Every structure is written in structure tokens, then in C-alpha cells.
Amino acid sequence: MHIMIVNFSLHGLEREDYEKACEELAPAFAAVDGLISKHWLANEETNTYGGVYVWKDRQSMLNFQESEMFRSIGSNPAFTNASVTDFGILKNPTRTTGVDL
């Protein structure tokens, strides 16, 4: 497994409109090869939004980062201050806390 966290601020887009767009886009994300899950993030107080992506492996994440879908996130003028960070998984403690790898 591999984790990717994407964060950004909304610019000129209200949270309600953002949520509606997320609901419309969710099926497309569900179909991304190698994506186990995406957890959609929202903190209206700090204007921080994004997602935690759980991938079957790092290569699946890298493939996604080469896709038009990923590029459209970075080029969207409604998203500012974007950051992308990826992490490997510590297998033994993750298993202990309930995720079978």
C-alpha cells in the first residue's frame, strides 16, 4: 500500500459547490486503477480541502500522477496553495491497528 495526501485552498468556489462537484467526480475516482480508496477532506475554518488516497502500490500512484485527471486538479484555478505528499506504510503497526496488508 501507498498513501498520497493532496491539500489545497478553495479560491472563488463555495464549499457547497465544491461538495457537489466532489459527489459528481467520485465515480470517476472509484474507477481509477490501483486506487483502494479516496477520503475526501474539508476544513472550512482553515480553507483546506483535498484527499487522502490509498493506493495498492506506489506505481499505481505514479501512474495516476501522469493522468489527465491528476493534472486537472493542479491546473484548476479554484484550487490554490496545492501540495502533494506521498508516504509508504509501516506494515506491522498498521496490521496491529486493524488494516490487513
Image (tube, grey):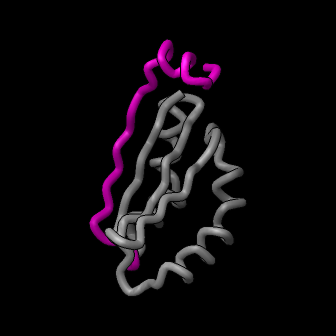
Q: Residue 81 in magenta?
A: yes
- Occupied quadrant, residue 71: bottom left
Residue 74 % position (x, y): 39, 64
For the N terminus, the image quarter is top right
For the C terminus, the image quarter is top right
Name the residue: 65% across, 42% down. 33
Residue 23 % position (x, y): 66, 69
Residue 94 % position (x, y): 51, 22
Name the residue: 53% across, 76% down. 18
Query: Residue furthest toward the left?
Result: 81
Q: Is residue 19 left or right of residue 74?
A: right
Name the residue: 64% across, 55% down. 29
Q: Is residue 98 left or right of residue 50?
A: right
* In the depicted structure, whether residue 8 falls above or below residue 65: below
Query: Residue furthest toward the top?
Result: 92
Residue 62 % position (x, y): 46, 39
User: In the image shown, does 66 or 24 lie closer to the viewer?
Assistant: 24
Number of numbered discs on residues: 0
Name the residue: 55% across, 16% down. 96
Q: Residue 76 in magenta?
A: no
Q: Is residue 50 left or right of residue 69?
A: left
Q: Is residue 38 left or right of residue 9?
A: right
* In the depicted structure, whether residue 31 falls above or below residue 48: above
Read off the magenta span: 78-101
- Occupied quadrant, residue 19: bottom right
* In the depicted structure, whether residue 41 falls above or below residue 46: above
User: In the image shown, does 29 or 13 lie closer to the viewer?
Assistant: 13
